[in-house]
Image: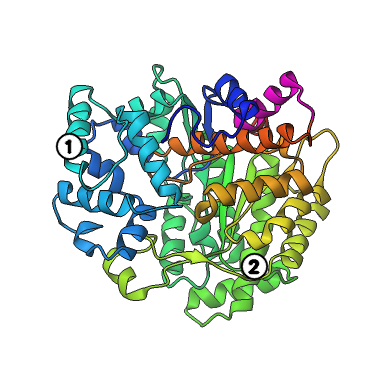
Amino acid sequence: MLDNDFILNGKTAQNLYHSVAKNAPIYDYHCHLSAKEIYEDNTFDNISKIFLGFDHYKWRAMRYAGVPEKYVTGDSDDLSKFKMWAKTCERLIGSPLYHWTNLELKNFFGVTEILKESNSEEIYNYCNKKIKDENLSPVKFIENSNVKLICTTDDPIDDLEYHKLLAEKSDLTFKVLPTFRPDKSLNLLNKDFTDYIEKLSTVASIDIKTYSDFLKAIKLRVSYFNEAGCKLSDHSLESLEYFSTDEGEVNLIFNKRLKGDSISQSEAEKYKFFTLKQLAKEYNDRNWVMQLHIGALRNNNKVMQGKTGPDSGFDITNDFEIASHLSKLLNDINNEASLPKTILYTLNPKDNIVLSTLPQCFSEDGVQGKVQFGTAWWLNDHKRGITDHLTSLGEQGMLAYSLGMLTDSRSFLSYARHEYFRRILCSFIGNLVDSGEFENDDELLKEIVEAICFKNIKKYLEM
């Protein structure tokens, strides 16, 4: 279990993984790590805090197993929480959480036993001793994982203090760059929208009274992020209805919302996507990459949201149609010659064929894979989800030019997910070679694997 050839089916897969993928550097271009925690680089308190502190994947599993909330996000002691996770984890047959957890214990702590309730206290104490003896901290985990780039997720009103401080540190072997995530400024239906606009107004030093004022303010923040080294934006599209509109109508809608008047769903969509088009121009002018994460249905349990807050494990996959609306959006941006490099992610695998074919409609001379179907995301980053994604890319897109894995995580242990992805990738390619569906050209195969692991994203971001 979890030996050197874990998930590596056949000699070709084993050769590709051990000779290329295993030691390839990591460019983690989308995550939710804290720049502040990286800069402060404090030694971790204990293994439970690392494992369970910010991991809603594990929280969901524990709750479904009947674990009381006090052991999940509550005030129980850390050993008891770890034991409850171990009891849950040992029963997660078929789950990536089982693999990730044991890969993390093996890679970061040298634990070769599979985590179970029966050995959980022994492993807990062993890991905590290792944390203390070796002063294990965020930077040590990052550097030990051969990470070269971390792109965090940041609000436009963030001052990016810790990104700037990290940029001044000459002893780091990796870069930490911000990502521009303006969701709060695009969601008119959020009850806190006007409060957020006031904060944006203060940070941008612009009295926002009209939509034109808002655009000036948000564009100033794009420039501010650009000066801090930002290379990507990110948008969560939890609805996707694209309507034609113009700035005059959007200004009226914006003014209605500032006055506290009710806004319809169609008005909110008009505002969101017209604004997204304006931002796309800014991204394109700065050679940024625009990321669109499509299809989350968030905070489904309002009772638990009230107790544990948003984004705490109560989100699921949505199932709305995306093809025509997304096509119209990208086409309108492209018609204005302002389509930036774009990565499209879906939380619903029903859309794999749409997102593996649509990018080819927006190819550009001399640009390798300008619009990309992003990696299997969130609820899809398991063995079958990754394999299905690779299959769609191979059949409909161009797998060799794809951008590889990202963690999308708040955990400093989640770099094990890159290993997990790379093992699945090498097995996928190895199976095609071993079955005679692709030539066994060792040099070319290694070049393709290396490119997917890190060279493609490095080129895409012009690092």
In the displayed structure image, the side of residue 232 where residue 391 appears, left or right? right
Residue 56 visible in this rendered orientation of the protein: yes
Sequence-wise, the earlier of marks 2 and 1 is: 1
Residue 450 magenta-highlighted: yes
Q: Quadrant of the C terminus?
A: top right
Q: Amino acid at mark 1?
A: Glu
Q: How many marks?
A: 2
Quadrant in the rendering for residue 453:
top right
Query: Disc 2 designates what residue?
Result: 240
Q: Position of residue 147 (x, y in %)?
A: 47, 27
- From the viewer's side, name the closer residue of 258 and 20: 20
Predominant SS of the magenta segment: helix
In the picture, measured across the screen, residue 45 lies left or right of residue 156, that is: left
Instruction: Decide: is 380 above or below 462.
Output: below
Where's residue 73, x and y in %?
25, 57
Q: Which residue is mark 1?
A: 122
